Amino acid sequence: MAMAVFRREGRRLLPSIAAHPIAPIRSPLSSDQEEGPLGVRSISTQVVRNRMKSVKNIQKITKAMKMVAASKLRAVQGRAENSRGLWQPFTALLGDNPSIDVKKSVVVTLSSDKGLCGGINSTVVKVSRALYKLNAGPEKDVKFVIVGEKAKAIMFRDSKNDISLTVTELNKNPLNYAQVSVLADDILKNVEFDALRIVYNKFHSVVAFLPTVATVLSPEIIEKESEVGGKLGELDSYEIEGGETKGEILQNLAEFQFSCVMFNAVLENACSEMGARMSAMDSSSRNAGEMLDRLTLTYNRTRQASITTELIEIISGASALEAAK
């Protein structure tokens, strides 16, 4: 009797229910626009698709940057290897003594203008600061000459008062000896020094570079060291032709040595920058690929969970309608 009453009441209420149909309820997992609430282990497929699209775009950029760096490296590497023959005769003649004790030292730090090239810039900055601590003293003066935007940004934080000259956008145009010699001439005119210490990254391979310090002495220090003896004492064994004095010849040698060492250092540093950028972009591309695989797996799981939930809702609804009959 109770079931008969329930059926009569159901038939009586059926027109009013049909007048206001209930919208079908969809699972949050099947929605393409909304995320699940905080704490719920679900995610919108649209959100995952957007993330996958972003990662794919980043991967395309990193691969393109790797190809560009490889192209630039091939163009600069041969010139860097050939430039090593410029400064080696000066090293054989005048030597390279980074531990020499002088009153006025200038540390020339070579870095890049752009980032995304690993730790080459932080490495030369660390070496430059170590040289500053080693050569600083109560009666000693140490100054910096910064070449490159990245080293400039780092050194300006705590060594702004010790910076004599900054040069940026050196690699904006293809590097040549005339351009670097103008830079070397500007440095010689703007700083007073007994020893110039050039800090740069020497290129070994795409994945290996070595922080290197090259020392160029002033003509006065060279003459003083030659009088004391040692390796520089061999300068007196050479004959001087022409009307120039020994001091004038040493002046010319020191200036030419500095320009040649700077030219080689700039090219070596550019090679190291491109090699480090290639390695960094290759690692970034691989990381993007791994992230894309994880996101694809998450997307497939979310989509399967959404389909399973909808099937469960359809079957449950059909079972409820069947039971109501």
Image: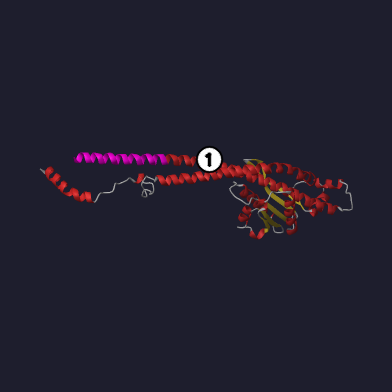
The quarter of the picture where the C terminus appears is: top left
- Residue located farthest toward the bottom when viewing the structure as drawn: 161
Q: Is residue 195 magenta?
A: no
- Residue 223 falls left or right of residue 122: right
Across and down, in percent, residue 251 comes to 81, 53
- Residue located farthest toward the left when viewing the structure as drawn: 1
Q: Is residue 311 magenta?
A: yes
- Residue 212 falls left or right of residue 1: right
Q: Which residue is mark 1?
A: 286
Q: How is the image coloured?
A: secondary structure
Task: Give whichever of 256, 31 is nearer the camera.
Answer: 31
Q: Residue at x 35, y 40 (%)?
A: 307
Q: Can see residue 179?
A: yes
- Residue 234 falls left or right of residue 132: right
Across and down, in percent, residue 284 comes to 54, 43
- Residue 143 falls left or right of residue 11: right
Across and down, in percent, residue 272 comes to 65, 44
Specify the amino acid type for callout 1: Arg
Query: Main SS type for the magenta part?
Result: helix
Q: The magenta stretch spans which residues?
A: 299-325
The quarter of the picture where the N terminus appears is: top left
Across and down, in percent, residue 209 comes to 65, 43
Q: Can see residue 98?
A: no
Task: Give whichever of 114, 49 is nearer the camera.
Answer: 49
Tag 1 secondary structure: helix
